[in-house]
Amino acid sequence: MSGQRIRRNRRPAAEIVRELRHLRSSPLRIDDEDESWMEGHERPPTPDLPVASRDQLEQLRLSRHRIGLLLVRPAFEQAVSGCFVRVNVNGQEELPDYRIAEVLGLGELDYGYKVGEIPTNLALRLRYEDLVMLHEINDVSNLVFTQEEFELWRDNCVNQALSPPTSHMVTRKKIELYNALQCEAKALSLIQRTFSFALRPAQKCSIVERHGAVYPWRLKHPLPLIPQPPPLPPPENPPRGLTYRIQPKSIASVLQGEEDALPLPRSEPDGN
């Protein structure tokens, strides 16, 4: 078999030419969308759409813990401006009520307070509903936005004619926050040594919050116990048309009293 010649079948030239012409006439396919070397085949830019869901807005949310990390880094105001927080709008003695608020900037207070172990007198200038107010950083929650709070914020944007953030703004802000967190933080000992404002005494709170935790539910305080007044006795001379129901025990006692009041029959003297 080794001595036999192997006959190879060659394709006819006409078939090869026909296949080459077919390949030349077919359009060029670009499988990789990132290829921009060819003119006219550049990747189209993504549309800049406004935020439409709670998960999209959640990317711009700053928790109290994250604000504390940014507080000791430079460009703190630039980093937090344009972000959103979940802030308690009620006082310390009231039930917590949270709103989604936009951070417009910073303000200074006349006193100091502590965010964790960091002393500061800075407050967040927040916009929610139709108000712009200063809030301490401790008023910000660590929990995520709820669907009810997001719908209230979206309705408020429509009523106040406010433009919601767009997808391009979300992307730029995420990069800005990442770069801010990569900066070197100030030493806590240096901040405590150079802080000159009088610290406000710490407010008393519950045991869970005192140890740095938060309640995952909305607190509901019980209503104050008010004793019910005793029932009023019926009047002695009630007006006509009004009747008063007597308790069963009193009915039994009345019947018993009537039986006691009945005269006993006299026994006839015996004539014998």
Image (cartoon, rainbow, N blue to C red):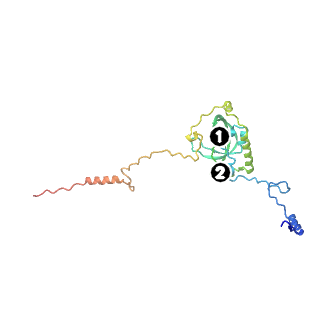
Q: Is residue 77 left or right of residue 2?
A: left
Give the position of the N terminus as an image quadrant.
bottom right
Residue 153 point in image, percent of width and height: 66, 50
Query: Which x, y percent locates residue 135?
Result: 65, 40
Disc 2, disc 1: CB below 8 Å? no
Residue 147 x/y as whole percent: 63, 52
| Nearer the observer, 38 or 114 | 38
Depth check, front residue: 80 or 245: 80
Q: Residue at x 63, y 41 (%)?
A: 139
Q: Residues within 10 Å of mark 2 (few under 14, many from 20)?
A: some
SS for tag 1?
helix
Picture quarter with the C terminus: bottom left
Of callouts 2 and 1, the N-terminal one: 1
Q: CA distance from mark 2 to mark 1?
A: 21 Å
How many circles with numbers are drawn on the protein?
2
Question: Which residue is disc 1 drawn over?
Answer: 137
Residue 98 place in picture, x, y as percent: 62, 46
In the picture, the disc for residue 150 is: 2
Residue 206 visible in the snapshot: no
**Furthest-left residue in view?**
272
Residue 207 falls in image quadrant: top right
Q: Which mark, residue 98?
A: none
Kind of residue sitting beneath label 2: Phe
